[in-house]
Image (spheres, rainbow, N blue to C red):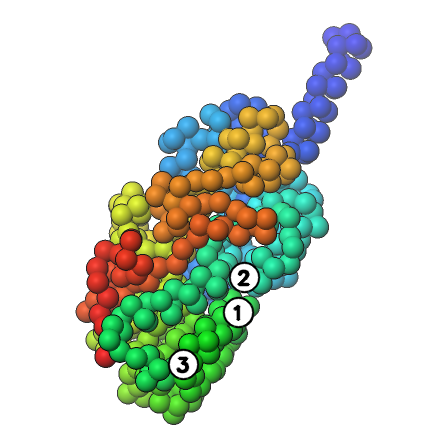
Amino acid sequence: MTADGMKLLKTIFLSGVIGFAATGIASAADDPVRIPVITALTGPVAVLGQDAQKGTELAQEAINKAGGIGGRPVSFQIVDTQGRPDVVRREMERLTRLEKMPLVVGCEISAGTASAAQFAESAQVPLVNLLSVSADILERGYKWYFAEQITGDDEAAAALGYLSAVAPGQDLSGKSFALLYEDSPRGAGTATRIRKLLGEKGLKVVSENSYNRADRNLLALMRKVQDSKPDILIWANYAEDAVAGLKAMKQLDFYPYVLGIGAGLGDPRLPELVDPDLIQKVHVSNVDYFSPDIARAKALREAFQARYKLDPSSYAGACYAGLLTLKEPLEKAAAGGALTPTAIRDALRAVNIPGDTTSWPAKSIHFDVTGRNIGAQALVSQWVGGRSKSTVYPPEIAVAKPAPLP
């Protein structure tokens, strides 16, 4: 080969390497669109990440079956953060600055999401959050952060709306309330918003207690709650601490009406881990961001049951639903050329997907200037007989009527 020929080959090779590094996504038509998904596969909240991984696998299969992203297969790559903000930051630096990924998806707890959002802003790479409900992140003026998820504001409004709906003819001012929450930004933030709404309605809060989500012995804490004699316990939790708390309640013969916040008390494995008779006795209801029995989640529920022999948890359902909605904006971004961070950000800003075309309970997927999905909607499910649960609120997506307050 001539010297000029060698020079041309070298130029082509270097151009390809530089093009890949600039976008983080290969330009060849048969190369996959690689998208990292950060979540906690290990550590205290590992069940969250392990469920998210299941939902991610099914979402990848569904998108590729539907033609991928502009004809290219998508490859969602799970990144273990251990649920630790310091690990999140380290992985974000690797993904955005070393691997040059033009997009990161978060199926991550609120503390980790806050760290990821801060780094994404400095790196100017879009971060799409599918799990964290922290409203505080949306108040920081970020331009590269997008949250399909509901926030603590939505949870608080759903909690009070639900309690009013299940107390027809009853005056809630005659009921006493206890607040219990794990002390991460997620739990504390939601409790703050619920406390405010209770105060605005003149409702009586007789106790408020927090704990670390890694605690597995909540007996002493639950005894403090019991001593305040609440009629209704509003409790923000994750799955592991929800189990620990319910077991403590049984030891104490403490049976208030329990309204959970988050995925913990709605976890489909709950009756396997806690006496179903106890679940029924405390009338467990749960404010959540996904439920497998709503009509629009039918395809996911059937695929999940076929693969894993159980219903999808909220963690799995939220990650699945959110990842599917990325197909449209990524295809629009790719239509203009390379999938760059700016092209993806602009496509996300223009998204307006009807909620009934997704597996979310959302009214739509549409982001405001803060990155908040203004169509996000919380729901409430209730355990029936302590063994199965049904979506009971809001009425437009409910599949059953809620049991009234005792």
Residue 284 higher or lower than 95, as above or below: below
- Mark 3 or mark 2: whose residue is earlier in sequence: 2
Judged from the image, the secondary structure of the residue bearing numbered disc 2 is loop
Q: Nearer the observer, disc 3 or disc 2?
A: 3
Judged from the image, the secondary structure of the residue bearing numbered disc 1 is helix
Name the residue nearer the viewer: 195 or 217.
Answer: 195
Question: Looking at this rendering, what residue extends furthest in the bottom direction?
Answer: 227
- Mark 1 or mark 2: whose residue is earlier in sequence: 2
Q: Distance between the residues labelled 1 and 3?
A: 19 Å
Q: In this view, does 239 lie to the left or right of 311?
A: right
* Image location (x, y in percent) of residue 322: 44, 46
Residue shown at 49%/78% (left/top)? 211
- The amino acid type, in three-letter code, at marker 1 is Gly
Residue shown at 56%/36% (left/top)? 347
Q: Which image quarter holds the C terminus?
A: bottom left
* Image location (x, y in percent) of residue 116: 61, 55
Residue 36 higher or lower than 72, as above or below: below
Q: Is residue 391 left or right of residue 151?
A: left
- Mark 1 or mark 3: whose residue is earlier in sequence: 1
Q: Mark 1 points at which residue?
A: 189
Q: Distance between the residues labelled 1 and 2?
A: 7 Å
- Displayed quadrant of residue 113: bottom right
Judged from the image, the secondary structure of the residue bearing numbered disc 3 is loop
- The amino acid type, in three-letter code, at marker 2 is Ala
Name the residue nearer the viewer: 125 or 97.
Answer: 125
* Image location (x, y in percent) of residue 271: 26, 68
Q: Which mark is residue 135?
A: 2
- Displayed quadrant of residue 247: bottom left
Q: Which mark is residue 203?
A: 3
